[in-house]
Structures are given as C-alpha cells and as structure tokens.
Image (spheres, grey):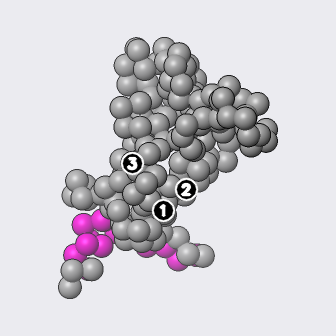
Amino acid sequence: MAEVDRQLIQRRNRLALLFAPPFDTTPLDPGYVKAYPPGIRENGGQYTHAATWSLIAFAMLGDGDTAGELFSILNPINHAATRADVRRYKVEPYALAADIYSVAPHVGRGGWTWYTGSAGWLYRAGSSGCSASECVASSSSSIPACRRAGPASSSRSASARRATRSR
C-alpha cells in the first residue's frame, strides 16, 4: 500500500489512479484498456471502484490518516469547492463519478456519474469500512459511527472506541 500511496495517489490533483503511466505508446496490447485515450477511465485515470478498495485497504491496515485523506479525495463535493473546480470537474458534485481523467487537458474532469457501483463502495467504506477495523484518522477527535448487525445496532463515537482499545 506504500507504493499505491507513492505512485498512484495524486494529492495535488485530488486523484487516486488505477495505474500509471497510461498505456499510450507501448507496442504491447493490454486489451480494451488501450482503446481509451491516455488518462481516461481504466487507461490510467481514476477508476473509482479501485480507489475505494484502496481506501478500505488502508483502513484495514489501521492507517486511518491515509484512509481519511483518500475518502476526502474521493468525495465528489471536494471536486467542486471553487468555480475553477466546477469548470474542471464538469459533472454533478453530489454524485460519485465512476472515473476521473488524469491527463492534460482534462485532469480532474469527472466521467460517468449515476452509473456506478463506486458510490455503494464509498458509502460502505464511510459507514462501516473504518469502524470494522476500529480505524479513524488521528486528526478526528470524535466521529459518530453506527454499525448494524441484523436487528441489533450500536452507535458510539471514535473517541469512545479509542478509549475502549486503550484500556
């Protein structure tokens, strides 16, 4: 996961890439992926399903800081914080994009929205992914978390979970 963080998470562009660099000039044929222009969809752009699985992996490893940062990177509203962001993103800031482009001149432009299971995975990561591993970013003093298991449910804050673990 250290290499994912080092090579694929572009904090400046708020992207978590599927792989880098995109297939462009290689004589090898990786299949349909190369049919997309470089940096678009699965060809080296952000493929949000995989980015969300990376978030879950960081959480499962106990790296709440990186998981929290990645959640913020993936959150669509953070791609529309300014007018320039809105002009770049070009899709609804309230719907998770299945992909975000990574190569100029389209860096940060959202791809398909409303056609993605990525939203379900991000919801799962935010609502239960971190709480399953008792993982919360160190910068968060208290984050409410709920967990449901059949008819029973429990709710306690991250600070309460930390207190329980430190005993």
Q: Which residue is mark 3?
A: 6
Q: Residues within 10 Å of mark 1 (few under 14, many from 20)?
A: some
User: For the magenta stretch, what is the residue range?
Assistant: 151-164
Q: Secondary structure at mark 1?
A: helix
| Disc marking residue 53 | 2
Q: Are marks 2 and 1 in contact (CB under 8 Å)?
A: yes
Q: Is residue 123 left or right of residue 139?
A: right
Quadrant (top left, top right, bottom left, bottom right) of the C terminus: bottom left
Q: Nearer the viewer, mark 2 or mark 3?
A: 3
Q: CA distance from mark 2 to mark 1?
A: 6 Å
Q: CA distance from mark 1 to mark 3?
A: 15 Å
Query: Looking at the image, which is closer to me, 123 or 4?
Result: 4
Q: Is residue 126 visible?
A: no
Kind of residue sitting beneath label 3:
Arg
Kind of residue sitting beneath label 2:
Trp
Q: Which residue is mark 1?
A: 57
Residue 60 position (above or below residue 85): below
Q: CA distance from mark 2 to mark 3?
A: 16 Å
Q: Secondary structure at mark 2?
A: helix
Seen at 44% across and 59% down, the residue is 1
Q: Secondary structure at mark 3?
A: helix
Q: Is residue 91 visible?
A: yes
Kind of residue sitting beneath label 1:
Ala
